[in-house]
Amino acid sequence: MTHLLSIVFCVMAFAFLAVSMDRHQMTVFGRALRAGQSRGFRIAGWCGLALALRFIVGNEGWALGLVAYSGCTSLAAGLVYGGLIAYERFSTA
Amino acid sequence: MKRARDPEPKARGIRQSMSDLHTWAGLLAGWILYAMFLTGTVSYFKDETSQWMRPEQPHQRDMPDAARVAQRVTATLGTIAAGSSQWSFDLPDERTSVIGSFWRTPGAAAGKRTFESASFDPVTGQRTSARETLGGEFFYRFHFQFFYMPVLWGRWLAGLCAMFMLVAIVSGVITHKKIFADFFTFRWGKGQRSWLDAHNALSVFGLPFHAMITYTGLVTLMTMYMPWGAQTAFRTPAEREAMTSQLSAFIQPGKPSGQKAGLAPVDAMVREAQARWGRDKVGRVTITNPGDTTARVAVSRGEASRVSMSPQYMLFDGVTGKLIDVKDSVGGAAETRGVLYALHLGRFSDLQLRWLYFIVSLAGTAMVGTGLVMWTVKRRQKLPDPARPHLGFWLVERLNIASIAGLSVAMTSFLWANRLLPLGVAARDNAEINVFFAVWGATLLHAFVRPAKRAWIESLWLATALLAFLPVLNALTTDRPLWRSIEQGDWVFAGFDLMMWAFAALHAALALRVARHRPCVKPAGKRAGARATMPEREKESA
């Protein structure tokens, strides 16, 4: 359960980080966001990653927590990546 | 100052040099690294694989009590390994169905470390009646020492390749300058560009893991690769022994007295360890000089839920059964090694964490695979005549096919051999392994004689078929088909069968993409002529 929640946290965080980037704003919104909005997403993304770390270390301790966090971030980044590819393919098809 | 005036040899930037280093370090070790990565990845489920490969050993609903199992196994060893100076066996855990054990060969020439091994049934304490197989242990051992060669050579080769991998990782990070700007970038259908994006994503997302696994892989065998520091610092046998005790719970036999004495009950010692660490947290029992007055019993702590492989054990007098010593901690340097070692093996993981290990490690395998394929994708465009590439290109392409698609075929064949080889075959465990290598060799021959694109497609479809029909074969040859496993809640067997279908789907998707691939035709350029005549043998898949 801890892992699942952390992955959800990390997926949201990486999704925020992705939409803070110009290239992916074009994919998702069809236009570039204002600089302030991009910055907002970027801050939200990094805060999300920090919160996920806090959450998982709080539940499992530093030793196991850090290992699990590394796995969760890798998997979450991959999921967001796959999601962006799928979104782009289906929205342009 | 000659250099400054000469406009021709422009100083190459660090990125360019690192890029070349990355390319060649990756290519030279790439085929072995791919095999190491994939066999290592499946080794995270080594115990489950072993269970599947011993279908006669029934599904355990409840874990047997470690203390009782220890007593039974000790009794058996007393008859089949009498006169041995050292016995060692695992205690049951929820992932294993048999008790692995090994002992020093009695009467072996002095100074020679020869061991015999056996698997025991935890319920009877006797040798298991399940089919003779190395199980998942084969992939695990192949991962760092290969086969058909002396173990030491294999480990040196693995270390050399791991060092190449470390070089490839560091140079790769330097080469990939836009590591954050391109973090989520994938450009679909752009040939080499797409391959590069995929390779980058697979590398960057798992970068902490890839760097950790490569470095810690070297650490696991560091006393073999780099013995000189210890040799210089520790000169006397006593000092050496002190160092060994910091690294391993595998106590060495002392000089036997020659006077016979019965072994105290081992179950009582295991109970004491259970009281200290928890019922299911006891890992292994090692007994030295059993039957002698100098007998010692070490009961070591299990690997679950502690991120360290440092030895922790309780040492008992084997005759009186009294606790002599408790080893709870090691020095800072040894503990650092213990943690790094544990990170590599991931045996502390619960099921979810194990899956994370598996998935990220699989991404690492794909990272090596995409890197290998990219070498050919990048160079094919520059070939004067892609229909007749030069020998180096031809060789790399064929080796790629055999080492990527061929390995899937070979690994699945190993599982087929486990179900199909007659039970009475002599040295059956070795026969399974011979099938693995024979099939792998055959896929290489196949790749040599077929056109490259056909070879990719055929190997991938063959792997798909073998994977997809494996659960069917299991249903036909054992009494543990998928529906019964699900009904009985045996998630090791059910999960194994389902994973075979998942891998079959993956291979089918790859085969379809290769088959559908048409080399993209770029608008007229200087290579347009060559491209137009390029036969459809180019291999590019997602």
Image: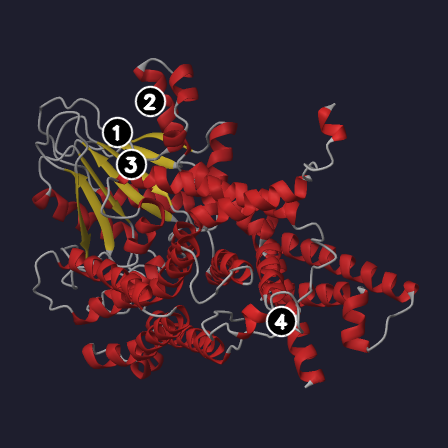
Label 1 is placed on what type of residue?
A: Gln
Chain bearing tag 2 is B
Name the quadrant containing residue B414. Answer: bottom left
Q: Which residue is mark 2?
A: B241
Q: Which residue is mark 4?
A: A82
Q: Which mark is residue B125?
A: none
Q: Is residue B31 left or right of residue B100?
A: right
Give the distance between the C-alpha atoms of the residues marked 1 and 3, in whole angstroms.
21 Å
Residue sitting farthest toward the top: B236
Q: Residue at x 11, y 30 (%)?
A: B261
Secondary element at image label 2: helix
Contact? badges 1 and 3 (CB < 8 Å):
no
Label 4 is placed on what type of residue?
A: Gly
Q: Which residue is mark 3?
A: B152
Q: Look at the picture and state if B198 lies above or below B483.
A: above
Q: Which residue is mark 1?
A: B252
Contact? badges 1 and 2 (CB < 8 Å):
yes
Q: Position of residue B336 (x, y in %)?
A: 51, 34
Q: Look at the picture and state if B390 lies above or below B331.
A: below
Q: Residues within 10 Å of mark 2 (few under 14, many from 20)?
A: some
Give the distance between the C-alpha atoms of the residues marked 1 and 4, in whole angstroms.
52 Å
Quarter in which the N terminus of chain B is drawn: top right
Give the distance between the C-alpha atoms of the residues marked 4 and 3, in whole angstroms.
42 Å
Label 3 is placed on what type of residue?
A: Leu
Circle count: 4
Q: Nearer the viewer, residue B237 or B452?
A: B452
